[in-house]
Amino acid sequence: MQAPGDEMGYSYDLGDHWNHEIRVVSIFAPEESNGRCQVLDGAGACPPEDSCGCDGMGNWSYKKFLQSWAKFRDGGTSASRREFRDLRAEASKALNYKDRLFDPDEFSVEGAQQAVSTAFRTRASVVQGSKQFTMPMSGFAPGAVQAPAQKGNKNILQEDEFEGITGPRYLQETVATRRDKGDNTLCAECGSPNNLKLCSGCKKIRFCGQTCQRAAWKAWHRQQCLNVQATRAKSAASKQQGTPVAA
Ligand SMILES: [Zn+2]
Ligand SMILES: [Zn+2]
């Protein structure tokens, strides 16, 4: 991806296959760019998570969903209107649309920017990113047969509730606990990869300068940073208490 016109593909969710085509439109010289990741424009709503209402088939069945939506908007027959209502009711159960009616045309630059900005704020990426579903033979407790987490990672177990399957079963997800290395990260406020400095309070996330650090402090980082500092102080104090002191 080095010149305008260069393209790459990206598939989100290897089960559902939401395939993306990404194309470089233009490249600014470093001195003309502030390095920020900004949403400039867009169209259409984010499709329902897990292809809910789309037959579990990503792009292919979402296209059918949009065709059904177009018919519905143009009036359609009573059968096609019913078909779309059913699909939409199913889509509205998706995790990202819970409790509101899914509107395929909904889009706002602010909303999209908000979603992108939230993604900058994580301090650790999933390194292994593995998820595995395990159903131990009866008599084994969840955890008895789980793979050990490697150094710097943590296993999260989630009891699963698949209907029709009895016995202990769980989903194991491995996530990173260490903060990302400097050259793998972005400013937690604006997404710039330039001149990053670690927040001196929590030492967890990085900012590209004081402007971003101040804006983040006011908007979302203050409480988070103070919580981390308080937890760190508490664990240092308990360590000290446990250390024998020579008389
Ligand atoms: Zn920044
Ligand atoms: Zn901080």
Image: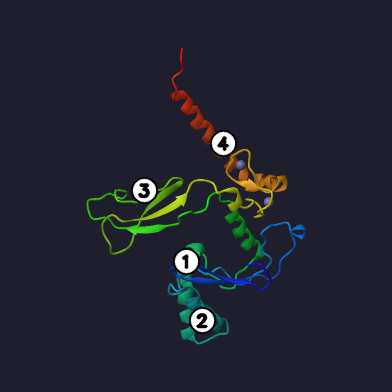
The tag earlier along the polypeptide, 3 or 1, is: 1
**Tag 2 residue:** 68
The label on residue 111 is: none
Above or below 141: residue 67: below
**Tag 1 residue:** 13
Above or below 202: residue 25: below
The label on residue 229 is: 4
Quadrant in which the N terminus appears: bottom right
The picture places residue 22, in percent across and down from the top left corner, at 60, 70
The tag earlier along the polypeptide, 3 or 4, is: 3
The answer to whether any part of residue 2 appears in the image is yes
Instruction: Please say if the residues under marks 3 and 1 sit with CB atoms less than 8 Å apart.
Output: no
Q: Quadrant of residue 28?
A: bottom right
**Which amino acid, mark 3?**
Pro
Compute the Cα span from label 2 to label 1. Answer: 24 Å
The picture places residue 84, in percent across and down from the top left corner, at 49, 79
Relative depth, front residue between 196 and 164: 196
Q: Nearer the viewer, mark 3 or mark 4?
A: 3
Q: In which quarter of the image is residue 243?
A: top left
Crowdedness near tag 4: few (<14), some (14–19) or many (≥20) residues, C-alpha within 10 Å: some
The kind of secondary structure element at disc 3 is loop
Compute the Cα span from label 3 to label 2. Answer: 47 Å
Q: Mark 4: is the Cβ under 8 angstroms from ligand 2?
A: yes
**Tag 3 residue:** 148
- Residue located 47% across and 66% down the image: 13
**Which amino acid, mark 2?**
Ser
